Amino acid sequence: MSKQVVARWQDWDARGIEHLVLREGPREIVAESVVVGSANDSFFAIRYRIRCDKSWRVRSAELAMVGESRKIEIAGDGKGNWTDAMGKPMPKLAGAIDIDLSATPFTNTLPIRRLKLRTGQSAEIVPVYILAPALTLATDPQRYTCLEPRKRYRYESLDSDFTRDIEVDSHALVVTYPGLFKRLR
């Protein structure tokens, strides 16, 4: 039997919104969402579906711009190897387990749930970073530190000085991401 959670976020400037449905089943976790947002004074809408195994390792991601033909489909083996929609290896993403989509706070949930950090513990990760609305793929070194389990985590970009203390709920879904996102539901 699967458990379902619905969440909505607004960006900090109240110019965008996201509606997410998260289903946790016995063998997989699936997140489906639509984000209506803005970047550099241009507006966009993106639809995404992320499928994880029961250990929160990303196994596939499908992203599509609403009203456009641009889309991304990638698959991971949970060990850091990725392929595109045609099954072609993507060595530039090697080593990444998680995905970080710039348009959503949800993708912070992936490493928080997967790593299961205790108070004071930190972990460095290198997720697949997907910049919206461009839909470009890269890797991005990051660090997560547990300040209070299932309540507060520190996110740090390891290639810039960007740091934020993120508040999450009991599902590890972001409640407040200062300067970027806040939970509505």
Image (spheres, helix red, strand yellow):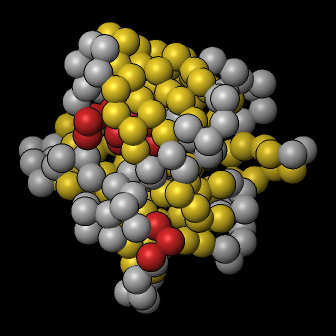
Tell me: 116 left or right of 142: left
11 and 141: which is toward the camera: 141
In this rendering, is residue 61 above or below 129? below
In this rendering, is residue 1 above or below 155? below
Residue 163 in percent (x, y) is at 59, 24
Q: Quadrant of the N terminus?
A: top left
Q: Residue at (65%, 54%) from the top-left corner?
A: 131
In this rendering, is residue 134 above or below 8? below
Q: Residue at (40%, 83%) from the top-left corner?
A: 89
User: In the picture, residue 171 is in which quadrant?
Assistant: top left
Q: Is residue 92 visible?
A: yes
Q: Is residue 175 visible?
A: no
Q: Residue at (22%, 43%) from the top-left corner?
A: 24
116 and 14: which is toward the camera: 116
Count of numbered labels shown in the rendering: 0
26 and 156: which is toward the camera: 156
User: In the picture, residue 27 is in which quadrant?
Assistant: bottom left
Residue 174 in percent (x, y) is at 46, 25
Tell me: 46 left or right of 55: right
Residue 123 in percent (x, y) is at 34, 34
Residue 116 in percent (x, y) is at 22, 30
Tell me: 180 left or right of 117: right
Q: Residue at (78%, 32%) from the top-left corner?
A: 15
